[in-house]
Image (spheres, rainbow, N blue to C red):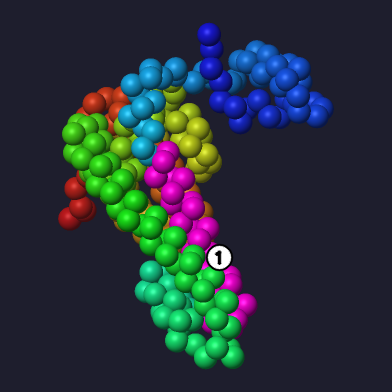
């Protein structure tokens, strides 16, 4: 049995989606030498990473609720800055608004969305506490969290979901993550180049737009992650220049 990434199959679907066309597209995609295999995970490995998927779902649901609150409030002329503080201000302003400006039905609907968002926040806090325990118990996750810019949840994602041996190089791993390699990245110097935040980044920000610099930095960090996962080494920041 061989597993391949499902996103690589879609370009080979010629006609409307059905079982026959899907099977043909899978066969054609699997025959392409440039399409690598996905490592098969055991039931235990899938179970260990399942809570991460649950967290991602709840985060998306909370984001939808918050966006709905902001959208409905904006229809009533109530807007607030982004972020948690802005959301609290928005909810307070809606609740205190005159009924002529924000009808009671609108207040009740927005309040209902707020309560649902709070309910998800409580569940997410409990999930984050469990994931933090998993992170502390996972040596690889702890090593990866030492990389500047990678927190415990991100490190645990890599530790539980990534099989580094399925990638021929750090470049292939970065491409799998959806990061386009750029010539401005210096990560190709090898695993001894471990500086994710350095004068290199400041220099890049001085020459490139922030979005391009962000992609280049993410690409560099991905290569560091792959190097650490394959070598088993700890993160070693580059000494500051004298």
Q: Which residue is mark 1?
A: 68
Q: Is residue 69 located in the magenta-colored stretch of the structure?
A: yes
Q: Which residues are magenta?
A: 53-78
Q: Residue at x 68, y 29 (%)?
A: 10
Q: Give left or right: position of 194 versus 222.
A: left
Q: Say if 30 sits above or below 156 in the image.
A: above
Q: Give SS at disc 1.
A: helix
Q: Give left or right: position of 103 versus 187.
A: right
Q: Say if 104 sits above or below 219 in the image.
A: below
Q: Quadrant of residue 139?
A: top left
Residue 37, how many percent across, how many down? 52, 18
Residue 195 seen in the current view: no
Q: Give left or right: position of 214 versus 21.
A: left
Q: Give left or right: position of 169 versus 142.
A: right
Q: Residue at x 42, y 38 (%)?
A: 53
Residue 173, how many percent across, how many down? 45, 31
Front one among 66 and 28:
66
């Amino acid at each position: 049995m061989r597993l391949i990434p499902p996103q690589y199959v879609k370009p080979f679907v010629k006609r409307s989606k059905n079982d026959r066309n899907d099977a043909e597209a899978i066969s054609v995609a699997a025959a392409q030498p440039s399409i690598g295999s996905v490592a098969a995970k055991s039931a235990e490995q899938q179970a260990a990473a399942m809570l991460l998927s649950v967290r991602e779902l709840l985060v998306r649901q909370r984001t939808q609720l918050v966006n709905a609150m902001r959208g409905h409030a904006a229809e009533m002329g109530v807007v607030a800055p982004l972020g948690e503080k802005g959301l609290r201000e928005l909810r307070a302003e809606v609740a205190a608004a005159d009924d002529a400006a924000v009808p009671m039905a609108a207040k009740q609907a927005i309040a209902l969305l707020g309560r649902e968002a709070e309910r998800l926040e409580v569940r997410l806090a409990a999930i984050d506490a469990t994931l933090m325990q998993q992170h502390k118990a996972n040596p690889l996750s702890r090593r990866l969290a030492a990389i500047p810019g990678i927190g415990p949840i991100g490190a645990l994602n890599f530790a539980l979901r990534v099989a580094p041996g399925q990638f021929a190089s750090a470049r292939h791993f970065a491409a799998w993550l959806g990061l386009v390699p750029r010539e401005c990245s210096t990560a190709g110097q090898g695993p001894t180049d471990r500086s994710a935040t350095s004068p290199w980044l400041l220099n890049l920000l001085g020459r490139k737009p922030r979005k391009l610099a962000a992609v280049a930095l993410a690409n560099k960090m991905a290569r560091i992650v792959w190097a650490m996962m394959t070598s088993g080494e700890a993160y070693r920041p580059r000494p500051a220049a004298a």
